[in-house]
Amino acid sequence: MELTALEGRILGIVKEKTRSEGGVIQSVLWGVLGVDNREGTKAVLSLVRKGLIKREPIVFKGRRTYKLLYSPRTINKVEIIVSLNPVMNIPCFYCKELQRCGSGGYFNPYKCILLSRYIRGLS
Ligand code: SF4
């Protein structure tokens, strides 16, 4: 994940302050970095979108601002095991007449003994 230089600086400070002080006040951070509110907010919102930090609204010295916290989103791997074995037992999957089979034809799923047996076996 690519970060701009400012995003990297903000992330480093937020990480450290989250560990040592439980977060950093956004308006205080602008003073530390020497950036204005517009520039800093843009970088912070980018980090929020990237899932690296989160913003919590707070009132600090009588003004509404945000507390920034390091909060990397962890993406857990999910393992999904899909068994195709039941589907592979459907006779049509291995039937050599599949291309010629259709309603009204000689090979017809409505009259097919193999398919009927399979369906009866399921119920
Ligand atoms: S319905 Fe019968 S004939 Fe048609 S494809 Fe399936 S198994 Fe083959």
Image: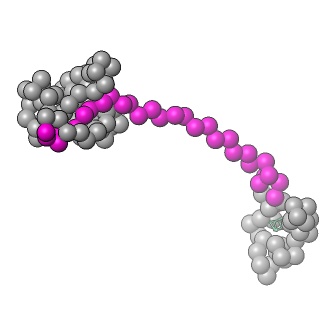
Residue drawn at point x = 87 percent, y = 76 percent: 111
Instruction: Say whether residue 80 is left or right of residue 102.
Output: left
Residue drawn at point x = 80 percent, y = 78 percent: 105
Give coordinates of residue 26: x percent, y percent. 18, 33
The answer to which image quadrant residue 30 occupies is top left
Instruction: Say whether residue 113 is left or right of residue 40.
Output: right
The answer to whether residue 76 is seen in the rendering is yes
Q: Nearer the viewer, residue 109 or 12?
A: 12
Instruction: Say whether residue 80 is left or right of residue 51.
Output: right
With respect to residue 115, does 14 lie above or below?
A: above
Q: Is residue 63 magenta?
A: yes
Give coordinates of residue 44: x percent, y percent. 22, 36
In this view, the residue farthest toward the front is: 62
Q: Which residues lie in the magenta part?
A: 62-90
With respect to residue 29, does 82 lie above or below?
A: below
The quarter of the rendered structure image containing the N terminus is: top left
Give coordinates of residue 20: x percent, y percent. 30, 17
In this view, the residue farthest toward the bottom is: 104
Q: Ligand 1 falls in which quarter?
A: bottom right
Give coordinates of residue 104: x percent, y percent. 79, 82
The quarter of the rendered structure image containing the C terminus is: bottom right
Residue drawn at point x = 83 percent, y = 54 percent: 89
The answer to which image quadrant residue 24 occupies is top left
